[in-house]
Amino acid sequence: MAEKFQEQAVVLSQCEIATDIYSLWIQTEQIAAHTRAGQFLSIYCDDGSRLLPRPISICEIDREKGTLRMVYRIAGKGTAEFSKKLAGDMLRVTGPLGNGFPSGEKKAFLIGGGIGIPPILELSKELKCEKQMVLGYRDANLFLLEEFQKQGEVYVATEDGSAGTKGNVLDAIRANALTADVIYACGPTPMLRALKAYAAENGMECWLSLEERMACGIGACLACVCKSTEVDGHTNVHNKRICKEGPVFNAREVEL
């Protein structure tokens, strides 16, 4: 079982990079050294009335400096509390949690949609294979785009057509006649469902990072299960725990 740590992390910096989307850098003692792309942290609120931690995906890792970057959207009172944190403040965090993306050498699509874009950034830095990044946004508010462009070829799709290809990430792939052998993706379920079907039609390997509300974050409460193709050894039903067996799954393992 992978090691995880609970720490009082120090906030290094935080800023709003798009409407209600914040970039947060923290200093950790041990977590950064053991984290890889696709994993997440559980962050606890200071407000005692909110007992459960919030799962936040990891956007960037600097193992040498012992720092982590999270890019998250305000989704409720917990994340709204986090957004008020300033340099020097403390955050109680547990991590790294979940299973990240596997490494590989095949020509890859790295695909992010909406707030599923941030976890793909660290993956784009860690994968040394030939890669094309395809990012799906709602509009021309293209957060993190410049960071991705430092890592290689980037193609953009926007729902309103204000930048890149009008439509979704598959529209951008088709419009630019892109090809690859493997897909790594994170984003909303409809996008992941479409990518799973696209991969099956084209005989591609496909790894999907699922987004889900979580409670414990360590696999004990079964609040974040998804339907699996095989019977799970933990529950003896067709379920997998996104926080424990995931959040990254081979597309063949899960039903979306």
Image (cartoon, rainbow, N blue to C red):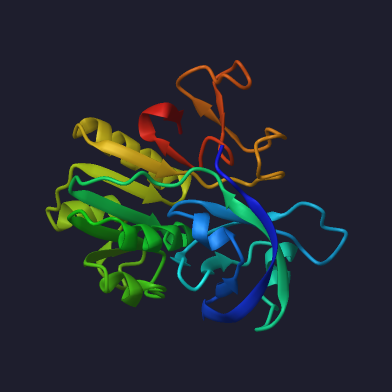
Q: Can residue 44 be seen in this view?
A: yes
Left of 254 or right of it: where is 44? right
User: Residue at image x 53%, y 47%?
Assistant: 211
Q: Nearer the viewer, residue 3 or 217?
A: 3
| Residue drawn at (71%, 68%) of the image | 91
Residue 73 at x, y = what percent?
57, 66
Q: In this view, does 213 lie above or below 176?
A: above
Q: Where is 10 relative to 38, above or below?
A: below
The location of residue 55, given as percent across then percent down, is 63, 54
Q: In which quarter of the image is residue 114?
A: bottom left
> In this rendering, would 188 be left or right of 1?
left
Residue furthest out toward the left:
177
Residue 20 visible in the snapshot: no
**Residue at 19 percent of width and 34 percent of height:** 202
Above or below: residue 81 compared with residue 101: below
The residue closer to the viewer here, 151 or 156, is: 151
**Side of 216 relative to 128 (left or right):** right
**x then y, percent, for residue 35:** 50, 55
Q: Position of residue 158 (x, y in %)?
A: 34, 65
* Number of dots carrying numbers: 0
Q: Residue furthest right?
A: 49
Q: Which image quadrant for residue 122? A: bottom left
* Left or right: where 171 falls relative to 192: left
Q: Which of 50 and 27 is in front in this view?
A: 27
- Quadrant for the N terminus, please: top right
Residue visible at 21% across and 58% down in the picture: 132
